[in-house]
Amino acid sequence: MKTTIKKVVSHISLILLFTMQASAQLGPVITCWILNRTGATGYGGIETNVQLVQYDKSNVYVSCTCIPGYSIGPWSGDPNIPSNQNFVFKITRSPQKNSGTPDSTGLGQIGVWTNGVVAYNAEDGMTYNNAGIWHRNAYYFEGSSFDDCLGHPDQSGCYHHHVSPKCLYTITDSTQHSPLIGYAFDGYPIYGAYGYTNPNVAGSVKRMRSSYQLRHMAQRDTLPNNTVLPVSEDGPAVSASYPLGDFLEDYIYVDSSGDLDAHNGRYCVTPEYPSGIYAYFVTLNASLLPAYPYVLGPTYYGVVQAGNTGPKSGHNTPVDSTTLYTAVKNVKKQINLSLDPNPVTDYAYFYIDPASDNNISGGLYDATGKLLKSYQMLQPSMSYSINFTNYPPGVYFLHLQTVNTSFTKKIIKIQ
């Protein structure tokens, strides 16, 4: 068959990752994500897990829908419906301890799990009598609306977890170090509930215990720092209706009473960081139920980058030239194609070489990681076209893969 394409015109080089050895050199902040390479869909027909991982020398950009690959719902009493959040989170590759005033883990997302779903802090956004003093514990006040995976959607349709994501990893496995299950937005990793007994040596494991404890009180008339409140600012008396634990101020940090610090983490060695790193751990009690502060403490350990937290956040755009991480393992056969023209003004055409693998799938993505067009069952010795007429000038990625290999081509659209 004659080819309609004679050569590839390329003005920008793109470094591809094809082997596990190369993956290991990049570090877990790039390689840990659960990539959806097949276009699999979940709740509401939305693509699941992480769609794209890009990185430059400073940051990793994770594009995700906030819909996991496992079944979610129903949510008793929760009228909200999960929707595609089109997040692009920016995570630093060089996290730094905050030597100043720690940043608070505010409302909204505080980190992202490896499946692209987000973590929230311990509160539900409401306070007793709307006074802004006694903050309600989401696990107590919203727990009835959690699904079997301990997540639920908020008013914006963002499915999230305030506590350990039960369906993401095996919480009952106490025989080995828990997997890396996410990153906080200060760039430090989040692990499951079990870590090495000795923080300096890989060996036996134990369940990581929070150092926050319930206060001993019958009246909610003082804060954890012993501030005595005026009567008008008292919380409800401790009772069957408002048991201890209902409010975040019911807890007090007791240094070294558990395994973790006030941020709910510690400096230690882990399987992914054998030389040691600061790491957060989700916390469970002896019955393997969520234990306060659940994920991160009231504050972050490290410096938090702008762009991930706060209203309308989580939609970052890479500033520098990035490399696409493809997570291809055990490469047996490559995808070879030629594409012309590039740069393109209206239509581009690509031809898949006869020596390429069969049954190729993939998609065309814009620079933010948004999927514009998906492809299924492409075959070698065939030509295909891409219509760019309705797309604005900019950078696009044609990403194709099979069970054996992967290929990514950067395409420039000009006026």
Image (cartoon, rainbow, N blue to C red):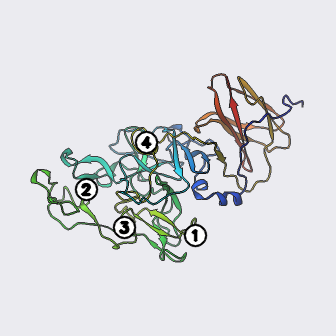
Residue type, numbered disc 2:
Phe
Q: Secondary structure at mark 4?
A: loop
Q: Identify the residue shown where x is 65% and y is 34%.
A: 395
Which residue bears the numbered disc 3? 210
Side (left or right) of 401 relative to 73: right
Q: Identify the residue shown where x is 57% and y is 40%.
A: 319
| Separation of residues labelled 3 and 4 (CA atoms) | 27 Å
Q: Nearer the viewer, mark 4 or mark 1?
A: 1
On the image, the x and y values in percent for residue 27 come to: 61, 59
Labels 2 and 1 touching (C-beta < 8 A): no
Quadrant in the picture for the C terminus? top right
On the image, the x and y values in percent for residue 286 come to: 37, 70
Residue 44 seen = yes
Residue type, numbered disc 1:
Pro
On the image, the x and y values in percent for residue 158 come to: 43, 42
Which residue bears the numbered disc 1? 274
Against 293, residue 136 (above or below) is above
Q: Nearer the viewer, mark 3 or mark 4?
A: 3
Q: Secondary structure at mark 3?
A: loop
Which residue bears the numbered disc 4? 158
Asked which quadrant contains residue 238, the reply is bottom left
| Separation of residues labelled 2 and 3 (CA atoms) | 17 Å
| Separation of residues labelled 4 and 1 (CA atoms) | 34 Å
Q: Residues within 10 Å of mark 1 (few under 14, many from 20)?
A: few
Q: Which mark is residue 247?
A: 2
